[in-house]
Amino acid sequence: MPALKRVTIDPITRIEGHLRIEVDLDADNVVRDAYSASTLFRGIELILRGRDPRDAGLFAQRICGVCTYVHLERATQAVEAALGVQVPANARIVRNLMNAALFIHDHVVHFYHLHGMDWFDPVAALQADPAKAEAEALKYASTPFNASQGTYAAVQARVKQLVESGQLGPFANGFWGHPAYKLTPEQNLILLSHYLDALGVQRTLAQAQAVFGGKNPHPQTVVVGGVTSVMDMEDPSRVGEYLFKVKSGIQFVNQAYLADMRMLAQAYKDEAAAGVGNGVPNFLDYGGFPLDDQPWPQGKEFFVKGVILDRDLSRVYPVDEKRITEDVTRSWYEGPGNGVPPFDEETLPHYTGLESDGSLQRSGKYSWIKAPRYDGKPMETGPLARLLIASAAGAQPFLDLKQQFEREVGWQPSYWFSTLGRTAARMIETLALTQAVPGWVDELVENVSKGQTQTFSSYQMKDGRGFALGAAPRGALGHWVEIKDGKIANYQVIVPTTWNASPRDAQGQVGPYEAALMNTRLAKPDQPLEVLRTIHSFDPCLSCAVHVVDARGQELAQYEVRG
């Protein structure tokens, strides 16, 4: 049997954090084995020990510079669960509004600025005819966003200037001209134009979150017991400002994001039909955006909590928190290898290094990410999981949006089990949220108009354990806390990327990234665009999963902050 050829990508770029992927190719350049490794250590659990529980959210949101809000909210909710705190309805709604602005912002940024260039070639757009591009845009939207011959010509001139200067900026180091690109020059130009438009859209959506959050990133107004943005909630001009800014994002989502995904779904339909990027068969989500004031899991939520096993969409199983464990058999940590519940976990680094040639130790430990398992099984989490669970449960608007998209682009239900399906599911989720937000604003306004202005519930500090499970843009996010003598005694976080980027476990089961790369054919092994496309479809956030430390325990640096 011929020897397999190894391709290593380290680091994977256009993601948050540091990720290494190693794949082994056969003689036909088909992936026969894959390894996903985080190359930095996560120490947030150790950082939080001994802290005041009321500060947990402020520390935890520093896990990441992108999805900061969800860690702030989840950490705060975990402490509230430990203390037996039920927040008022207005606090729940305001939290949902901040979270919705984050989700819409995050999904737009992911598609256009992190993942989109896996599908479109900005350099090829220079060969497009702007008039034909305008006509092409009308095929996918009745009123396409910022689509005109003049706009497209200006975009071409802008990018041409970059190319001629030799300074490609954000378009540098791409695999331009790669045979895996399938769009016409005009289609490439449409996506390139929207890439530039999205830079302004993401700014406006960040400002929307800051209306109630105080700032972005790292909002400050979520506290144990509720929220502090009382004056903003009671001020019609501030509520109107939030809605105005979100609606500008809604316009972009409907006229650009949806249209562009229709275009990709048709251009790359054969890849979706072939299941390229199809990974583990199990899907998990904890739900999210609570719609009433009942505790999890009894409460009704906009996102549907549930588990799908073996791609069987005829049944959605309820989520049982007690079935969640983490395995460190192949991770650089000490501890039992066969899976430990989060409340019983410790985070004890145990780095064993690389092979002498710098490659991963495939027979031993090879990643700083632990291996979460649900009932012993690897699970994919994220927008695809949420869409499959919600539509399988018959939940609206997800089922209608999914079926409508299938009709528009000629997809079969099986096409969702693919890299492109994962990418399209994120757009469907964004659409669903844009439909929900105006109603949540109306609910808040109605409460305030009736004189219901409470945003905080008082409480007493006490010992206890609590956890909070909910949705983050990249998938299922859980925080677990134990409080003793008014301090955090133990803390654990399992983020979406921990689920998706997990290494093998004690049973040898591969994680979702690794599974999704199997059987992928690379057109040019020295330009592994197909690997990047699939990994980026998960929207990796290694900063959520790991944090830097020197393996020898040495001080890395000292910083002085001057006022």
Image (cartoon, rainbow, N blue to C red):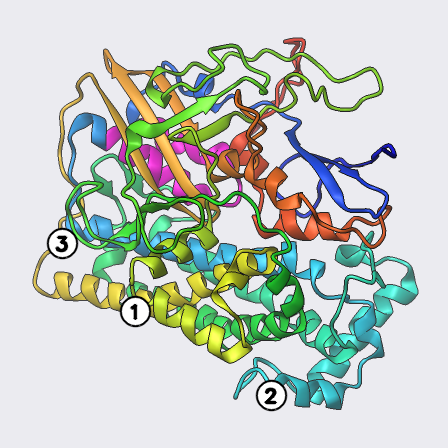
Q: Is 79 colored magenta in this rendering?
A: yes
Query: For the view shown, which residue lies furthest in the front direction?
Result: 1
Q: Which residues are magenta?
A: 55-80
Q: Is residue 444 left or right of residue 428?
A: left
Q: Please give the residue where the numbered disc 2 appears in the rendered image.
A: 138
Which amino acid is tagged 2? Leu
Q: Which residue is found at the position 8% from the left and 60% from the top?
A: 451
Q: Which residue is found at the position 18% from the left and 26% from the top?
A: 83
Q: What is the secondary structure assignment of the residue under circle 1? A: helix
Q: Please give the residue where the numbered disc 1 appears in the rendered image.
A: 438
Closer to the N terminus: mark 3 or mark 2? 2
Q: Residues within 10 Å of mark 3 (few under 14, many from 20)?
A: some
Q: Residues within 10 Å of mark 2 (few under 14, many from 20)?
A: some
Q: Main secondary structure of the magenta part?
A: helix
Q: Can residue 108 be spotted in the picture? A: no
Q: Is 225 colored magenta in this rendering?
A: no
Q: Can residue 340 be spotted in the picture? A: yes
Q: Is residue 271 left or right of residue 29?
A: left
Residue 459, position as x, y percentages in the image: 13, 29
Q: Residues within 10 Å of mark 1 (few under 14, many from 20)?
A: some
Please tell me which residue lies in front, 562 or 95.
95
Tag 3 and tag 2, C-beta contact below 8 Å: no
| Vertical position of residue 562 compared to residue 529: above or below | above
Residue 50, position as x, y percentages in the image: 36, 14
